Image (tube, helix red, strand yellow):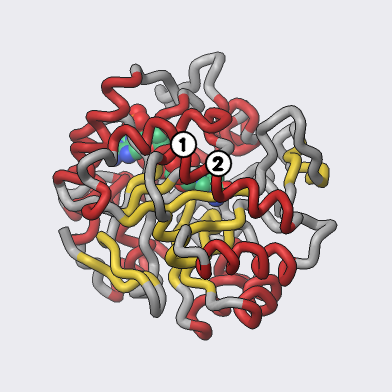
């Protein structure tokens, strides 16, 4: 598996693994199979494992903790805090475009509580990359990051990250403590990062980890495939890009992705991931999958070379803003 420098501070596999998919948001999977899937990823060199305390209300971290037992030194372990998932904790209500609000807490006291909860569930004594999941609109980001930096001083965390931030928030935080990586949504399906935060990460030498790098499965399975539909309990039913007329139009608009992938003899997922890897050499996508075959398929994207002609072809057909339907926050 190829390695990448994720910003100035971390080296990881060029493609990581997003464990959120093991919580049933996009279809179910048993506990044993979840653990085996992650262990398969690690055995095949996919070593950046991404989770968050809020995924499955702590369950996802527990699963990851079980999967990495005896393998801790082979893993670059990334987790997040800040989405409140415990009933006894307050936070700032942050509305989304997907029909629900998030409760976010970036208060220093909560930061100090969160790190110990994550370490316990992950059954480890250190986290390689610890992100604030969302900025708290009622707490200056300097205060949140200042408290996160205490965990670095205490040896509980090696590097700090930020998720779902603007370029300005990154710059402010970076003055308090070096930020190793930013994790924002980014794919051909959602290119907002290009308008702001991606330039800031490049300038500061901060790694960039695109979340939903396959457009939550849209680019890999739905683009150009009208027979693909969501189950009634699939979480993506909340996402306007997967709803009704938007979904059908998006399937058409992104159909050429499948065409180019066929011409190149690769899969649409590999093309979507390879495109991300070609945007900057400090980008490490974290696709999620419940299937071991797809772990190898996705890892294979690191070996795909896209020419300038391919990149221009893609640019002409999939410009920013092409997808119909509002994104989570913007
Ligand atoms: N920071 C944040 O706010 C935030 C938000 C969302 C996600 N994330 C992180 O980003 C990670 C990835 O995001 P995501 O899971 O939302 O979206 P994603 O990785 O873009 O897509 C996951 C979906 O794609 C399917 N898939 C994966 N590989 C495939 C392949 N080769 N061919 C066909 N289908 C494939 C999976 O289905 P199967 O399981 O059936 O393969 C799953 O339904 C998450 O696990 C999480 O760690 C972070």
For this orientation, the residue located farthest to the top is 232
Residue 69 occupies which quadrant of the picture?
A: top left
Specify the quadrant that holds the C terminus.
bottom right
Q: Label 1, on which residue?
A: 121
Q: Is residue 114 toward the left or the right of residue 172 in the image?
A: left
Is label 1's Cβ within 8 Å of ligand 1?
Answer: no
Residue 44: x and y in percent read 15, 47
Residue at the spot 65% in from the left edge and 74% down from the top edge: 173
- For the question of whether residue 218 can be seen, the reply is no
Instruction: Report the Cα–Cα distance between label 2 and label 1.
Output: 6 Å
In the image, residue 166 sits, relative to residue 83, either above or below, namely below
Element class at badge 2: helix
Q: Is residue 227 toward the left or the right of residue 87 in the image?
A: left
Q: Nearer the viewer, residue 184 or 93?
A: 93
Is label 2's Cβ within 8 Å of ligand 1?
Answer: no
Residue at the spot 50% in from the left edge and 57% down from the top edge: 130
Q: Alpha-carbon neighbours of circle 1 within 10 Å: few (<14), some, or many (≥20)? A: some
Does the CB distance between marks 2 and 1 fall below 8 Å?
yes
Element class at badge 1: helix
Q: Nearer the viewer, residue 196 or 111?
A: 111
Give the number of the disc on residue 12.
none
In the image, residue 306 sits, relative to residue 137, either above or below, namely below
Residue 241 occupies which quadrant of the picture?
A: top right
Q: Label 2, on which residue?
A: 117
């Amino acid at each position: 598996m190829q390695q990448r420098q994720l910003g100035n501070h971390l080296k990881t596999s060029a493609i990581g693994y997003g464990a959120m998919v093991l919580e049933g948001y996009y279809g179910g999977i048993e506990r044993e199979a979840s653990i085996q899937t992650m262990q398969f990823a690690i055995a095949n060199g996919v070593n950046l494992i991404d989770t968050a305390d809020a995924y499955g209300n702590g369950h996802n971290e527990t699963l990851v903790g079980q999967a990495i037992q005896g393998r801790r030194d082979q893993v670059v372990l990334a987790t997040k805090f800040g989405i409140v998932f415990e009933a006894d904790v307050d936070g700032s209500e942050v509305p989304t475009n997907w029909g629900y609000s998030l409760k976010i807490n970036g208060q220093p006291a909560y930061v100090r509580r969160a790190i110990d909860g994550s370490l316990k569930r992950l059954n480890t004594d250190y986290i390689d990359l610890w992100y604030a999941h969302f900025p708290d609109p009622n707490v200056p980001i300097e205060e949140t990051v200042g408290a996160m930096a205490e965990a670095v001083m205490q040896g509980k965390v090696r590097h700090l990250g930020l998720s779902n931030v603007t370029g300005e928030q990154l710059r402010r935080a970076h003055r308090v403590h070096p930020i190793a990586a930013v994790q924002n949504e980014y794919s051909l399906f959602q290119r907002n990062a290009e308008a702001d935060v991606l330039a800031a990460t490049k300038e500061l030498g901060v790694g960039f980890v695109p979340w939903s790098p396959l457009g939550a499965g849209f680019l890999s399975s739905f683009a150009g495939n009208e027979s693909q539909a969501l189950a009634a309990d699939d979480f993506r039913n909340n996402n306007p890009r997967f709803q009704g007329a938007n979904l059908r139009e998006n399937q058409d608009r992104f159909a050429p992705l499948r065409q180019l992938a066929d011409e190149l003899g690769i899969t649409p997922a590999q093309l979507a991931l390879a495109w991300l890897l070609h945007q900057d050499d400090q980008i490490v996508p974290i696709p999620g999958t419940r299937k071991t075959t797809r772990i190898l398929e996705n890892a294979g994207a690191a070996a795909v070379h896209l020419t300038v002609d391919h990149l221009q072809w893609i640019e002409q057909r999939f410009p920013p803003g092409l997808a119909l339907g509002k994104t989570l926050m913007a």
